[in-house]
Each structure stands twice: as structure tokens, then as C-alpha cells.
């Protein structure tokens, strides 16, 4: 069975600074990987996804993520954060054998300092 | 498209009462997922359907919880009787039958059981 670990529960970053959120997964075959963002009181919105091909994927709101098979990682990055990026971020992994069922990490809450 | 629709958005009830949460998936989507989100346990998959058939209900906490999908455009999650520990935000998500595909989330129902 697949699993996802987001090591950082909380991250505080200054507005304008860069942001990197870590995600490590466990799965024997090629995983399908997702990053979702949840603003307070809202549902989860897809930021980006990796299915195959180029290991550096671009998403919405200026986010990108890089799939590194050797490290079983799919870290999310943004060069310069905005106050509106304050939210909770979830990494998720899927597998072909599981249909479109996803396993989610515990989430990382990002606080943005002015 | 209107996206995934959930109702009600907020529900406050008393312990022992029956609660019914409703979900309308995106038209044309064949997968439907029910999740529960709490501070303590994070985002948990309760059950999911493919073509209206329950595929995996291993996440359903106990017999007090039941879910149905009578047709492709409607699903319910019922709790009877409700308990204070059921207080959480319940999300519905849907995706197409293409594997892999993105899950699209509804806005959630915030349930409070007094």
C-alpha cells in the first residue's frame, strides 16, 4: 500500500521569500502525485500533478514541484510567496492498481509573515 | 461546470439524531469519494464508489455510518445515531474513470454534533 509523509506540520515564511514543502511517498511502482491547497473554510484545490514525463511540473499560482524517483520525493516550491499563499498544503499519491483512490499526507500549514 | 456540490454547508445537531449529508458530483464523473477531516486524524477516506457501486468502504468508522449512490448524480452519507466525536468537515470529491485522473473536491459540510 502507498503512503505519504509530509515532515513539516507548520512552516512560517516571510512574504516575498521562497517556499519549499517536502513530500515523501512510499510506493513500489511509478506513483501518481498531486499537491492540493486548502484555504481556511474551503475545499481542496489542485495545485499541480505528476503522472509521467517531465519530472518538473508547473502548477497554478506560480507553484512548481519536482518528482525525484531516487529520493521518493515530490517537493513543492514557490520562488516568492504572497500573503494569499497562507493555507494548508496536502501531498497525495495514487496508484494505477487503486483506480483513482488517493492517499493523502498529513498536510503542512503555511503561515506568511508580512 | 458547477463543480462538486455539497449540502448542507453547515449542520448542527444533537447527539442521537440522524444526519444526512448530500453530494452531487461533476457531471460525467464515474468515481465519487467521501472524506472526513479532523484536526486529530487529518483527511481520511471513508468510502468510494465507481459507477454507483461501492468499491472500498474500509474507512467507514462503524455501522452508524452508511453511504449510498442511487444514481450517477447523487450520493448521501448518513450517520445514525450521531455522536459528538463525529464532528468534522466531510468532503465529497469526484473524478472521471480515466486512470489516473484528478479528484475534484466539493466545499465540504461542517458537522457539529452537540
Image (spheres, coloured by chain):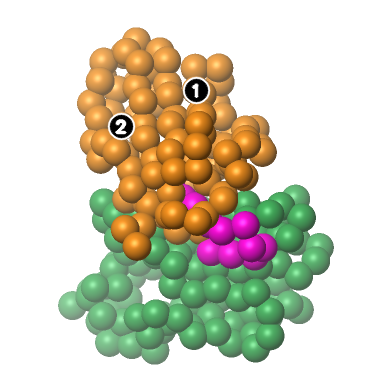
Chain colours: A green, B orange
Residue furthest to the right = A28
Residue furthest to the top = B16
| Secondary structure beneath label 1 | strand
**Crowd band around label 2 with a 10 angstrom C-alpha radius: few (<14), some (14–19), many (20+):** many
Image disc number at residue B8: none
In the picture shown, does residue B63 fall above or below B70? above
Q: Nearer the viewer, residue B99 or A27?
A: B99
Q: Quadrant of the C terminus of chain B?
A: top left
Residue at the image point whose x is 49% and y is 75% from the top = A48
Q: Is residue B66 visible?
A: yes
Residue at the image point whose x is 36% and y is 57% from the top = B3
Q: Is A69 positioned to the left or the right of B47 in the image?
A: right
Q: Is A13 positioned to the left or the right of B27 in the image?
A: left
Kindly identify which chain the residue marked by label 1 belongs to.
B
Q: Is residue B40 visible?
A: no
Q: Nearer the viewer, residue B55 or B84?
A: B55
Residue at the image point whose x is 76% and y is 55% from the top = A97
Quarter of the rendering containing residue B14: top left
In the picture shown, does residue A12 fall above or below B89? below
Residue furthest to the left = A114
Residue on which the image places disc 1: B65
Residue B33: x and y in percent read 52, 45
| Secondary structure beneath label 2 | strand
- Most prominent secondary structure in the magenta stretch? loop
Residue B36: x and y in percent read 45, 39
- Label located before the other in sequence (2 or 1): 1
Magenta region includes residue B96: yes
The residue range painted magenta reads: B92-102
Residue on which the image places disc 2: B111
Amino acid at each position: 500500500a502507498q503512503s505519504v509523509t509530509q515532515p513539516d506540520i507548520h512552516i512560517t515564511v516571510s512574504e516575498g521569500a521562497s517556499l519549499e514543502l517536502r513530500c515523501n511517498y512510499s510506493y513500489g511502482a511509478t506513483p501518481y502525485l498531486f499537491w492540493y491547497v486548502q484555504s481556511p473554510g474551503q475545499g481542496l484545490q489542485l495545485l499541480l500533478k505528476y503522472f509521467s514525463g517531465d519530472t518538473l511540473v508547473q502548477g497554478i499560482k506560480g507553484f512548481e514541484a519536482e518528482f525525484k524517483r531516487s529520493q521518493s520525493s515530490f517537493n513543492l516550491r514557490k520562488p516568492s510567496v504572497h500573503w494569499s499563499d497562507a493555507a494548508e498544503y496536502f501531498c497525495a499519491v495514487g496508484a494505477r492498481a487503486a483506480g483513482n483512490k488517493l492517499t493523502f499526507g498529513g498536510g503542512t500549514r503555511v503561515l506568511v509573515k508580512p | 461546470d458547477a463543480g462538486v456540490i455539497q449540502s448542507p454547508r453547515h449542520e448542527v445537531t444533537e447527539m442521537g439524531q440522524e444526519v444526512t449529508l448530500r453530494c452531487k458530483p461533476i457531471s460525467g464523473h464515474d468515481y465519487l469519494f467521501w472524506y472526513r477531516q479532523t484536526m486529530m486524524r487529518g483527511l481520511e477516506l471513508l468510502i468510494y464508489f465507481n459507477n454507483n457501486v461501492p468499491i472500498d468502504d474500509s474507512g467507514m468508522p462503524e455501522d452508524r455510518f452508511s453511504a449510498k449512490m442511487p444514481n450517477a448524480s447523487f450520493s448521501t452519507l448518513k450517520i445514525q445515531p450521531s455522536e459528538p466525536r463525529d464532528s468534522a468537515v466531510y468532503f465529497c470529491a469526484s473524478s472521471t474513470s480515466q486512470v489516473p485522473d484528478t479528484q475534484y473536491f466539493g466545499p465540504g459540510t461542517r458537522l457539529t454534533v452537540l
